[in-house]
């Protein structure tokens, strides 16, 4: 996709910003699994980028993932998103793999997090799913 500016390449993902949508970043998973510590490193970078560029929207393209990791999802929702909300990064778009088991795991994981942490700020965010980066940019 054109108009993407590569901000940083990690072992398991690439982070881009969008030239014609300067308050938007994209995380593209490039591996089938992202262990917790590299996951935290990627999203800590996104947090720094959000501050620097006043990001308001994040697209997380997970289509290459085949392994769902609940501890990463919990950290992402209850710690990282909490900080991002306060920075103004409140619009999140997810692109999931087509694998039904992965999608079901995400749904179950979200339900568990929502039930356990109803007071967290991620509940106030605009979180939606899309099938492509282009669709996510338009949502």
Image: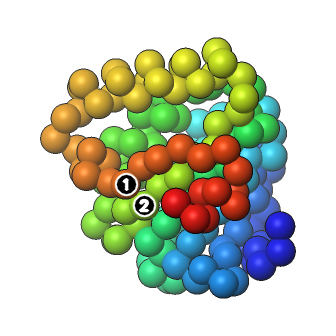
Residue 89 visible here: yes
Along the line of sight, which residue is nearer the eye, 11 or 7?
7
Along the line of sight, which residue is nearer the eye, 69 or 99?
99
Residue 33 visible here: no
Residue at the spot x=60%, y=80% of the render?
21
Residue at the spot x=70%, y=50% of the render?
132
Residue at the spot x=71%, y=33% of the render?
97
| Residue farthest top in this picture | 101
> x and y percent of residue 43 in the render?
55, 55
Residue at the spot x=72%, y=29% of the render?
98
Q: Residues within 10 Å of mark 1 (few under 14, many from 20)?
A: few
Residue at which label 2 appears: 91
The alpha-carbon separation of the residues under discs 1 and 2 comes to 5 Å
> x and y percent of residue 30 in the render?
81, 46
Q: Are marks 1 and 2 in contact (CB under 8 Å)?
A: yes
Residue at which label 1 appears: 126
**Disc 1 or 2, which lies upstream in sequence?**
2
């Amino acid at each position: 996709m054109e108009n993407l500016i590569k901000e940083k390449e990690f072992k398991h993902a690439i982070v881009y910003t969008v030239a014609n949508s300067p308050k938007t970043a994209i995380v593209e998973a490039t591996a089938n699994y992202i262990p917790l510590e590299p996951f935290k490193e990627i999203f800590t970078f996104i947090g720094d980028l959000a501050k620097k560029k006043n990001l308001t929207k994040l697209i997380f393209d997970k289509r290459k993932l085949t392994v769902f990791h609940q501890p990463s999802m919990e950290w992402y929702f209850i710690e990282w998103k909490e900080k991002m909300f306060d920075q103004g990064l409140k619009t999140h778009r997810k692109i999931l793999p087509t694998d039904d088991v992965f999608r079901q795991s995400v749904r179950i994981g979200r339900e568990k997090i929502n039930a356990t942490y109803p007071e967290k700020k991620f509940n106030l965010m605009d979180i939606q799913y899309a099938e492509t980066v282009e669709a996510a940019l338009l949502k």
